[in-house]
Image (tube, rainbow, N blue to C red):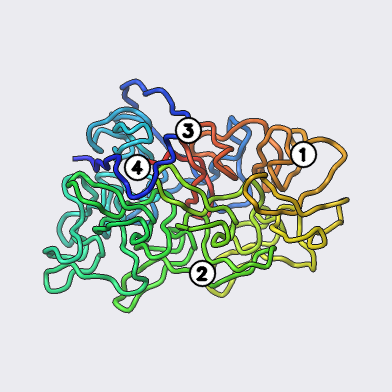
Amino acid sequence: MARRYSQKTTGPLPWVTFALLAPFAFATCRVQKLQVLDTADSAAPSASGVPASGGANSVGTGQGGNASTVCDTGLGDGLACEKSTDCCSGYCSLSVQVSLECHQALGCLGVGASCVKASDCCELSCEGDAVSLHCNNVNSCTVIGGSCAKNADCCSAKCKSNLCAALGPPPCRVAGELCATNDECCGGSCVTFSDGQLHCRRNLGCRPFGELCNQASDCCDALCTADADGILRCAQVKACNTGDGKACTRQVGDPCKNNDECCSRFCFLHFDGAQRCAPSASCRGLCETCVRDAECCSSQCAVEPDGNGHCQGGTACLAEGETCSVNGDCCQTNGPTTCVEDPKGLKVKRCRAEATAACLADGNSCATASRCCGGHCAQLNGTASCFSTCSALGDPCTSRADCCDKSADCLSFQGQRICAVLSL
């Protein structure tokens, strides 16, 4: 059956504080495609005026998720379902409305897709023989101590002497394993599965530190390394000092306790009840992951020895949009720039240009959404510009506020941030 998470979690559910969408009608679809950004510097604008995908992403064998899902007959995202095989995406789960709906298989594979291990699959089930393994929605992966015949049977991807074995450091529990609290899980979310027991939930989007992976782009930190047993897990990047002089180690998508842990300086309670680092409504600051120069406030995305891009500074002062401590930290090259709380209420200061105009009209270049009359600052053709239109599902975003769908989050996926609806 479909993975049915109950309402019960070990933390508060923030979705109750948001306006929810009306239930969708039961209908069918012929073709469905989720668009995501590629790593090219050029991107065509979508109907909303925000860049959509410039390249195709294939459905791979545990290679980070379904970027496109095509079916002859099935249900589209947001439509009521009973099981994952009903959906074009191959994934049916509880929504923030606490009803079973089809969801994007974002960062995981839907039913029927080829897989390597259980964590590749949205349903946490990769079954078959040694020659052919596919995601299904019949059985979940086996927890530590349970019987197994092959690695793919185990949530840990580690079958020793016909028993699923625990992983080494880091000590957090990967998706599918039994848990008692959110803190025990690598993904920061412990929920009730259909068996009535608490298990670590598999996050959509990028995979946080400690979760199983296949390649760097699977991970929020863009770093996938082998442990002592040769099992690939998302690693944590080295500590890095942001513009305000404080060290950070967690990227967008990683679980967090407070703003200071996040390189984005924004720790947010998501719809699934877990706190994760979220993108701020500005350009990417020092230490944040990047794939192109234009994403960074400093306009410098440099490749580090681990092969991944991070925003870096090149001057003695901080560009607009960077976190800061005092006015003197900020560059004054384009007129007066002050270090102020932006956005207000988060207690995080950023360099903000003080222009004579009250706000910037659509089309003007921007570093923070607060400077835009329309409230949105998004990348278009390599330049961050002000927009008054919101981002549709699958379109790029800088923060949750950019997403048209009020039950959507701005999720990190393969180095990009796009609007997507989270399931419970």
What mark, if any, has residue 18 been given in the picture? 3
In front of the other: label 2 or label 1? 2
Q: Are marks 3 and 2 in contact (CB under 8 Å)?
A: no
Q: Earlier in the sequence, mark 2 or mark 1?
A: 2
Task: Please say if 417 is above or below 246.
Answer: above
Residues at circles 2 and 1 in contact by the CB criterion of under 8 Å: no
Q: Nearer the viewer, residue 182 or 417?
A: 182
- Name, please, the residue furthest toward the bottom: 228
Q: Amino acid at mark 1?
A: Asn
Sequence-wise, the earlier of marks 1 and 3 is 3
Label 2: how many Cα within 10 Å (few below 14, some 14–19, many 20+): some
User: Which one is earlier in the sequence, the residue at label 3 or at label 2?
Assistant: 3
Residue that label 2 marks: 237
Q: Nearer the viewer, mark 1 or mark 4?
A: 4
Residues at marks 3 and 2, CA–CA distance in whole angstroms: 33 Å
Left or right: where 172 falls relative to 412: left
Residue position for label 1: 364
Say the numbered circle drawn on residue 221.
none
Quarter where residue 331 is shown: bottom right
Residue drawn 35% across the image and 35% down it: 95
Which residue is disc 4 drawn over? 424
Q: CA distance from mark 1 to mark 3?
A: 31 Å
Q: Quadrant of residue 243?
A: bottom right
Amino acid under disc 4:
Leu
Towards the viewer: 382 or 420: 420
Amino acid type of disc 3? Phe
